[in-house]
Amino acid sequence: MSSVRRRLLALALVNIAFPGTLLAQEPEQQQPIVRVELSPESVSVGEAADLRVTVLVPTWFASPPVFPTFEIPSAITRLPPDSSFPTSERVGGESWSGIVREYRVYPLRGATYRIGGQRMQIRYANPGGQPLSAEITIPDIVLRATVPPGAENLQPYIAGRELKLSQEITGDIASLQVGDAVVVVYTAKLDGTPALFLPRLVPSLDLQGVSIYADTPILEEGPPGRRSEKLTLVFESGGEFTLPGVRLDWWNTGTGKIDTSSVPAASFSVAGPTAVNGPSMRSATNWQFVLASLAAVLAAVTLARPTLAALTSRFHAAKRVHRQSEKYAFNELRGTLRRTLRRTLRRQSTPRAVYHAMLHWLERLGTGMDARRFSTVYGTDELIAAVAQLSVAAYSDSDIALDLSGLNRELAAARARWRKTRSRATRIALPSLNP
């Protein structure tokens, strides 16, 4: 008799002697149950549909099930607070353990969305043996989204129960001067949909004579969803400046109509030299110094015997003119840089003093020359970045590591290029002495 036949005969004898033994050895495995529910099945764009996934096992979970993320093209899927919780149900007369996971799906455009087809792994206990594993496919379910009549032309499409816009201005706006700064914070609060629905609040701005630094927008899911945008304005010239107002049209899901939220424009009056369009290549203060010196020499020759008092007066006048020169202001700037660098090494940095010294020097280069224009026209990318970092460090709480040595070097190189350009422009402008 073969060995296979002997084993079969032995199993038959065991089954006769102990009925039900073979059935106990191979019990029928009961598969987990996965159920998907959607409510409602049709929504307006911007409204949420609640998606519920229920997983049931005949015993208990050996490890938490890994639910799908349900990332859907042209839709936003979010987990509400307390999105997962345990449950139990009677299946075939027995109590099964379960876990429920809830999602909120926000369609971004009018379309039919087919949700499902994803697979998830489930491990559950097998009393008296190793835990069992099962891979279950999520059943398909369909969500339909439509754009409400009357809201087809909203660009961008924003929907919710309430949208509030606010504007907060920090700074001494009543007595602004060149070199001062203000901080403007725009905030939008949207009740009913995530903050990702909120668009950019402030457009790109380019105000002549003003450096504008925008922080990274802050998004908070809420509720309500919140978006904040912070601008720091550094006034590098005097004049009247206006930030445009903000206006958003949005679909009110409560009233079923379009509403508008807005904040007004913000205006600032800054005392000081006014910037003009177009670069100025001549420095009037240098010519004043030369003319004053020539006047002193001519007066000495003409008078022959000038008095000491007159010479002293002219000397002090020439000295005052020299103190107004570009060269003097640049030397003062470099001195401030060196002092600030020493304070930085002692952790006593004062970047605002450097920035004010730089603005003071730039005024000597000609009307309308500010830090942004100078670094763009005569500097390198390194100087542009260094000036921007210096401005932010001077007028914000940002902890920025400044390379003051590099700034000193880049400023000297840019000044050399400015002097070369100015010298060439002066030669072209002067008439020939011997026509």
Image (tube, rainbow, N blue to C red):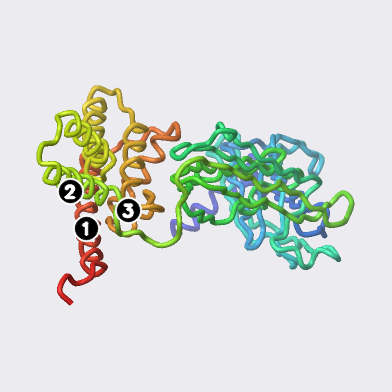
In the picture provided, is 62 more to the left or to the right than 98? left
Q: Which residue is mark 1?
A: 417
Q: Tell me the quadrant of the picture where the N terminus can be found.
A: bottom left
Q: Amino acid at mark 2?
A: Leu
Q: Position of residue 338 (x, y in %)?
A: 21, 32
Residue visible at 82% across and 53% down?
Answer: 259
Q: Which residue is mark 2?
A: 294
Q: Amino acid at mark 1?
A: Arg
Q: Position of residue 43 (x, y in %)?
A: 81, 58
Identify which residue, 367 or 10, lies in the foreground. Answer: 367
**Mark 3–mark 1 CB contact (< 8 Å):** no
The dot on residue 375 is 3
Q: Earlier in the sequence, mark 3 or mark 1?
A: 3
Q: Amino acid at mark 3?
A: Ser
Q: Position of residue 305 (x, y in %)?
A: 10, 37
Give the answer, above or below, for where 4 lies relative to 176: below
Circle 3: element type: helix
Distance between the Cα atoms at labels 1 and 2?
28 Å
Residue visible at 87% across and 56% down?
Answer: 257
Residue 93 occupies quadrant:
top right
In the picture provided, is 277 more to the left or to the right than 283? right
Q: Tell me the quadrant of the picture where the C terminus can be found.
A: bottom left
